[in-house]
Image: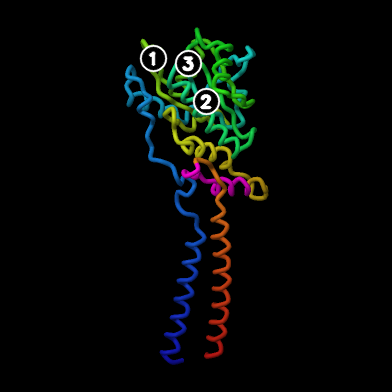
Amino acid sequence: MDRIGTNKRRGKWQRVGSLVLSTLFLCLPRAGAATEGMAGHDPGAEHMAGGIDRKAALAYSQAAIGHPLGDYRLIDSDGNPVQLADFRGRPLILSLVYTSCHHVCPMLTTHLKGVVEMARDLFGEEGFTVATIGFDTPVDTPRRMAEFAHARGIDDPGWHFLSADAETIRRLAADTGFLYQPSPRGFDHLAQITLVDARGVVHQQVYGADFEPPRLIEPLKELVYGTPSRATEPSGWLNRVRLFCTLYDPASGRYRFDYSIFIGILVGLMSLGAIAVFIFRSWRETRGSA
């Protein structure tokens, strides 16, 4: 076998290797695609009132991540007792507010309403639960919590407006890393939403009264869709597809299902088919010239 023939065949196999590598990279999803469009992390410092040290409040809040919530007795807006543990089994979005607030708490709750509606479109009515709890215990009665919800136009059966006694609020605030302090204007506190997983463990903190929707929906998406399922279960595969292909579109301010990954897979399969034909033909030529 002469040297020229050997070099030609070596060149063919090098081209095959390059095509295979190119196809593999084509099929891989882009890093960070699930969070595309998210802004940089800014923990809502503008909503931190001056009576509490901002850095200390953020550090205290972040330290609660990974901490399990206790099982506390609360009262819903109809006056019925509720156990916090009743909300386990699905992710919980939890916010602490006081109803006599005239700025941050109403703004945060109204903004949260829009984000929750967006999340309902993605995850359905049964995907997660929301709880807004009044921490100004002498004022935030079940009736006041109902009025607060009505004033925001919130009529979601999976969103609960709750009251509790002072000791329960103190312990719950400690569990969630929420600092608050009386001030001449009412209360100083961090504008904070706590995302709790299905086991009742603090998973994520979201800050600011007008946060970008992906700050809450992306970690919520991981909790709803990211739980590993047995490979034989169709729902497990479907959830994995939803996890990676449901992306935030900053232009429209909405989430959408991204079909580009399927186009990439199709192109990749077609390329692999072409490579297989090329390999087969090269192999036949190699055998013929041997």
User: Would you name the residue on which mark 3 appears?
Assistant: 98
Name the spot of residue 130 as percent of width and height, x first: 57, 27
Amino acid identity at mark 1: Gln
In whole angstroms, how far apart are the C-alphas of marks 1 and 3? 12 Å
The mark closer to the camera, 1 or 3, is 3
User: Would you name the residue on which mark 2 appears?
Assistant: 94
- Is disc 2 in contact with disc 3, using a CB cutoff of under 8 Å? no
Number of other residues with Cα within 10 Å of mark 1, as a class: few under 14, some 14 to 19, many 20 or more: few
Q: What kind of element bears circle 1?
A: strand
Among numbered discs 1 and 2, the one appearing first in the sequence: 2
Name the spot of residue 149 as percent of width and height, x first: 56, 20
Residue 251 visible in the current orientation: yes
The numbered dot on residue 181 is 1
Residue 73 visible in the current orientation: no
Residue at (43, 92) in percent of width and height: 2
* Relative depth, front residue between 289 and 193: 193
Q: Is residue 225 above or below residue 147?
A: below
